[in-house]
Amino acid sequence: MTIWIVLAAITLLVAGFVLWPVLRQRETGADAASDDDDQNGNSELNHDLAVYRDQLAEIERDIERGVLSTEQANAARIEVQRRILNADQRIKARESGATSGIGKPSLRIYSALAIVLFLIGGFGLYLDLGSPDMPDRPIASRADEINAIQQAESINSNRLAALNRAVSDLSQKLIADPENLKGWELLGASLMALGRPVEAQTAFLEAVKLSDRDGDYLAMYAESLIRGDNGQINATARGVLKEAATTQSGDPRIQYYLGLADAQDGNIAAAVDRWIALANSAPADAGWLPMVVARIKDAALAQGIDIEGRLDVAKAAPSNGPSQDDVAAAQQMTPEERQDMINSMVDGLADRLDGNPDDPEGWARLMQAYMVLGKQDKAQAAYQKASDVFADQPDLVARFDALAKEIGITAN
């Protein structure tokens, strides 16, 4: 309570220091200007009245001298009297206006009311959004947390520095030995890890040529093309993937990105078919498998595609996506009911991640689900939150960056 009183007093003091000179200056300037205007205006009118009275006296003298006839004198006298009456009314109007101005509320009162309303509004906003019961967290009590953050930043900085040194060293070695296939592969991988896919394309293309267009290197080259185009699979990338699919390569990126190409063309059913085949043929411990399974289920639910019995249940189990029953039930729904069901499940996933954010696969699914629903702003927010939650794990952040570019989210 004491701190609130102190803060309120400081706020009032600062507001007074800021507003008082301004109000004082405006009020003084306004009063001076008003007084000058009144004095100058009345002085001119009084001078005009004196002139008009002299003109009346001059008319009388002209009558006595015989310069003006009676009719001419009467006309001149009426005109001068009209001017006198007009000047007199203007003087009275000025005096009336000055008197009425005395009763107007002071600007200072309005300013004081504005400050009070500002303080009340700030207090109410704090009660609504703040946490008055939250205990203070002195810097000393957060030493471990701060050290952990600094250590993570240091590790990430050291990792980036090591990658940059590796890129520099590899570039020099490849100038001397341009036939080094593994060197080009490592250079491309390092550039991809640094978020420089356009530069990585040159390295992977050299590896493709030296390997006699091996399927694994074609997959690496295709991925660099896709990430360099913000996740879009252009004609070049599509051609490289199709060529890779004709080789003996088992790189999962080939079928995954071909499925993504189908999805980007609007053929979701073909994408799901390709991804199901990829998931069913994958080792159970494949690190990328949960992401593919989640994508299959999200796409099937969103489009009402029946996948019952088609996806290996054992491999589908680790995913927190919709169950086979959920997908089957979606077949019987109207489009509106299905959309409501999807929104409900996505909202449930978002709520679960708010309470338990340590779930990288969940964040990846949430990003994808929001993009499927056309909620790009929420997808962007989920991506940013996931990057913040796992800021001390550069590998996961790199995965989120790659996924963001792949599905059309603006990556960091």
Image (cartoon, rainbow, N blue to C red):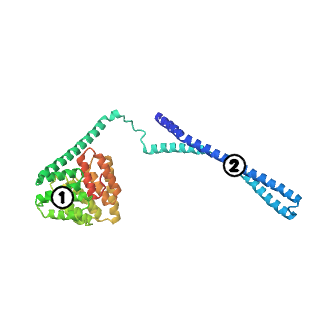
Determine crowd level at label 1: few under 14, some 14-19, many 20+ residues with C-alpha closer than 10 A.
many
- Mark nearest the camera among 1 and 2 is 2
- Residue 67 is tagged as none
335 w.r.t. 369: above or below: below
Seen at 15% across and 51% down, the residue is 186
> Could you tell me which secondary element the residue under label 2 belongs to?
helix
Residue 158 lies, in percent from the top left, at 23, 42
Q: CA distance from mark 1 to mark 2?
A: 86 Å
Residue type at numbered disc 2: Asn
Residue 51 lies, in percent from the top left, at 78, 53
Q: Which residue is mark 1?
A: 221
Q: Earlier in the sequence, mark 1 or mark 2?
A: 2
Determine crowd level at label 2: few under 14, some 14-19, many 20+ residues with C-alpha closer than 10 A.
few
Residue 126 lies, in percent from the top left, at 45, 43
The answer to whether residue 279 shows anywhere in this view is no
Camera-nearest residue between 168 and 405: 168
Q: How many marks?
A: 2
Q: Is 321 on the left or on the right of 118, as rendered?
A: left
Residue type at numbered disc 1: Tyr
142 w.r.t. 307: above or below: above
Seen at 20% across and 54% down, the residue is 288
Seen at 24% across and 48% down, the residue is 396
Residue 111 lies, in percent from the top left, at 56, 44
Q: Are marks 1 and 2 in contact (CB under 8 Å)?
A: no
> Could you tell me which secondary element the residue under label 1 belongs to?
helix
Query: For residue 86, what is the image quadrant?
Result: bottom right
Camera-nearest residue between 118 and 49: 49
Q: Is 75 on the left or on the right of 273, as rendered?
A: right
Q: Which residue is mark 2?
A: 40
